[in-house]
Amino acid sequence: MVERVPLGERLTLYFDGSCQHNRDVTSETPTGWGLVVVRGDAGVGRGDGEVIEEHSGRVITDSEDVGWLGAEVGSNNTAELTALAHTLRWLLTEGGDAAVTLRGDSKYALNIASGAWRAKANRELAARVQMLWTEVSGLRALLSEHIRAHRGHRWNERADHLAWRACIGEKPLPLQFWKPGSR
């Protein structure tokens, strides 16, 4: 179904999570997520298409916080799942029914979300992401693609930049001043 949408109108959403220290993680471990929404991306990694929106934030591990999605600790996996959750939430709030492509560098997040894998940890967050996946895929066709991390794919690198900057509590560089590979 994605092929029927003209390239210039096709939406591709890149998501990524980032963790400052992915060892001995706790609820205090800094983590962040990033989302880049691109219209007209051919998927080859050279930065085709136009960025129409970007979003990022910290992973919330406090169950009392209104933005909590189920992450109990700050880890790379909870950051990746949170990034995918925000990606799916964006699709729900922005509406539309055209097929979209989701691209991320986490096989873990993509396989947990689609139900191909079962979560051994992060179960509440995984369940929330699976619920969102089911809801969105009931409204529009979802094509998910795994891309290799840190290989120079422009929009994946941008999602990584957004996630890293959220993780360390800094604002991302504006797109026009950012260079792929720089965190």
Image (tube, grey):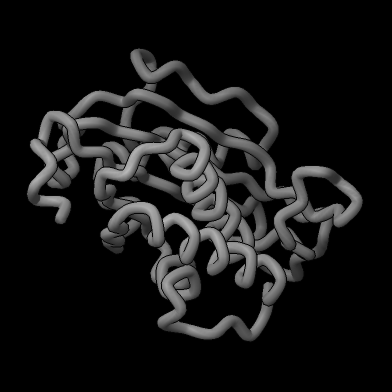
Q: Is residue 68 above or below residue 45?
A: below
16 to 173, vertically: above or below = below
- With respect to residue 81, does 35 lie above or below? above
Which residue is drawn at the image coordinates 28% and 57% (left, top)?
Answer: 141
- For the residue pair 99 and 165, the one nearer the viewer reads as 99
Q: How many marks?
A: 0
Is residue 18 in sight in this rendering? yes
Where residue 39 sits, quadrant-wise, is top left
Residue at image location 48% in from the left, 20% down from the top: 173
Q: Quadrant of the N terminus?
A: bottom left
Residue at 24% across, 24% down = 50
Q: In the rendering, at what x and y percent does residue 51 appear? A: 31, 25
Residue situated furthest right in the rendering: 64
Seen in the picture, residue 2 relative to 155 is either above or below; the reply is: below
- Horizontal side, residue 134 vs residue 32: left or right: left
Q: How far from the left and from the top, in percent, is residue 116?
A: 41, 82
Q: Is residue 159 left or right of residue 156?
A: right
Q: Nearer the viewer, residue 64 or 21?
A: 64
Q: Is residue 183 in sight in this rendering?
A: no
Q: Residue at x 42, y 72 (%)?
A: 114
Name the spot of residue 42 as percent of width and height, x first: 12, 41
Classify residue 180 as left or right of residue 79: left
